Image: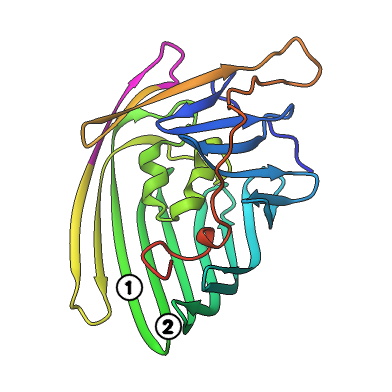
């Protein structure tokens, strides 16, 4: 198993906006929380992500970048039943940059006594230029009770002249990956290298296969920095998101990071991680 070494000016992010992180002695993130909502916990020895007391298999490459997540589920409660499985894959180029992300899922069950069947697939392709992620293209297909739907999107990212000296992922860069829940891995260095410069804006265009729905919107981003060049605040469309850090204890043979999370938990439902959020709930 790889031994995590990536840090930012001798520190690791403990909080970014509403997200809070805990690490083990090897600087590996072991828990992610959003406000009081636990997204999941990672057991590196077992190779699993734990969500809602259930386990999804997770794999990493030697650089500590996540390469795959898979799981199956079977729920029955209050007249609702969901039985399905899902798989997510991540791939990287020789420079350690993320170049593709794919999802596939299938599910059947009952909602309010009505049977349903669902299949979905999704792929995002990432294009890099001069060390920066400049374009994201996605394609999604889903079949819900025999009805087929297709969606696509394109995102173009623009950069300023502020160099990302420490290689930090930002909330803005994580958002353009269009992974929904899985994008949080980027904030703790698990989705390959960040862009060489800080993104200052991006424009997204969405449409369905029938051209009956089409939308476009733009987002602006700005930053302030600490004296050690770590991010202090990121502003997305003017809204501020603060960054906090914990220092590594270099006096120990095992690098230790203080845990800042309270013990109460409310976990992300396992199937929600694999079913696109606009699709079947």
Q: With 253 as the anchor, is 226 left or right in this view?
A: left
Seen in the picture, residue 220 relative to 74 is either above or below; the reply is above
Residue at left offset 48%, top offset 80%: 118
Residue 154 screen position, x and y as percent: 30, 62
Image position, residue 10 (x, y; %): 59, 18
Q: Residue at x 49, y 35 (%)?
A: 36
Residue 171 is inside the magenta segment:
no
- Classify 10 Å Cα crowding around label 2: few (below 14), some (14-19), many (20 and above): some
Q: Please state which of residues 211 and 57 is positioned toward the viewer in this rendering.
A: 57
Where is residue 38 shown, x and y percent of the image? 55, 41
- Residue drawn at x 47%, y 40% as measured from the top left: 194
Say whether residue 249 is left or right of residue 270: right
* Quadrant in which the N terminus is drawn: top right
The residue that mark 1 highlights is 151
Report whether 140 appears left or right of 181: left
Q: Quadrant of the C terminus?
A: bottom left
Viewer-proximal residue, 69 or 167? 69
Q: How is the image coloured?
A: rainbow
Q: Quadrant of residue 234?
A: top left
Q: Quadrant of residue 90?
A: bottom right
Magenta segment includes 221:
yes
* Residue under label 2: 143
18 and 157: which one is in front?
18
Distance from the alpha carbon under mark 2 to that under mark 1? 12 Å
Task: Say what secondary structure mark 2 lies in.
Answer: strand
Whether residue 159 appears in this view of the structure is yes
Q: Secondary structure at mark 1?
A: strand
Give the left or right position of residue 50, taking residue 181 as reference.
Answer: right
Give the magenta part as a residue range. 220-231
Question: With respect to residue 124, does 213 lie above or below?
Answer: below
Q: Residue at x 63, y 59 (%)?
A: 69
- Seen from the viewer's position, the closer of residues 191 and 147 is 147
């Amino acid at each position: 198993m790889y031994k995590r070494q990536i840090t930012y000016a001798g520190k690791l992010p403990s909080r970014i906006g509403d997200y809070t992180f805990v690490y083990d002695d090897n600087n590996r993130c072991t828990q992610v929380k959003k406000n009081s909502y636990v997204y999941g916990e990672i057991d590196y020895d077992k190779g699993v992500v734990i969500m809602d007391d259930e386990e999804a298999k997770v794999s990493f490459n030697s650089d500590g970048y996540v390469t795959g997540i898979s799981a199956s589920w079977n729920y029955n409660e209050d007249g609702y039943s969901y039985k399905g499985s899902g798989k997510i894959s991540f791939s990287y180029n020789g420079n350690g940059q993320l170049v593709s992300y794919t999802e596939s899922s299938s599910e059947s069950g009952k909602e309010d006594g009505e049977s349903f069947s669902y299949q979905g697939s999704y792929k995002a392709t990432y294009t890099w230029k001069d060390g920066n992620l400049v374009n994201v293209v996605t394609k999604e297909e889903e079949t819900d009770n025999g009805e087929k739907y297709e969606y696509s999107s394109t995102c173009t990212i623009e950069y300023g002249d502020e160099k990302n000296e420490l290689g930090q992922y930002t909330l803005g860069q994580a958002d353009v990956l269009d992974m929904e829940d899985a994008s949080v891995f980027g904030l703790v260095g698990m989705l390959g290298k960040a862009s060489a410069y800080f993104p200052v804006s991006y424009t997204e265009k969405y449409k369905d296969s029938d051209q009956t729905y089409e939308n476009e919107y733009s987002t602006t981003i700005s930053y302030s920095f600490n004296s050690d060049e770590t991010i202090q605040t990121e502003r997305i469309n003017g809204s501020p998101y603060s960054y906090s850090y914990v220092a590594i204890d270099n006096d120990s043979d095992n690098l230790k990071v203080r845990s800042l999370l309270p013990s109460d938990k409310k976990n992300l439902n396992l199937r929600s991680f694999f079913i696109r959020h606009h699709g079947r709930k």
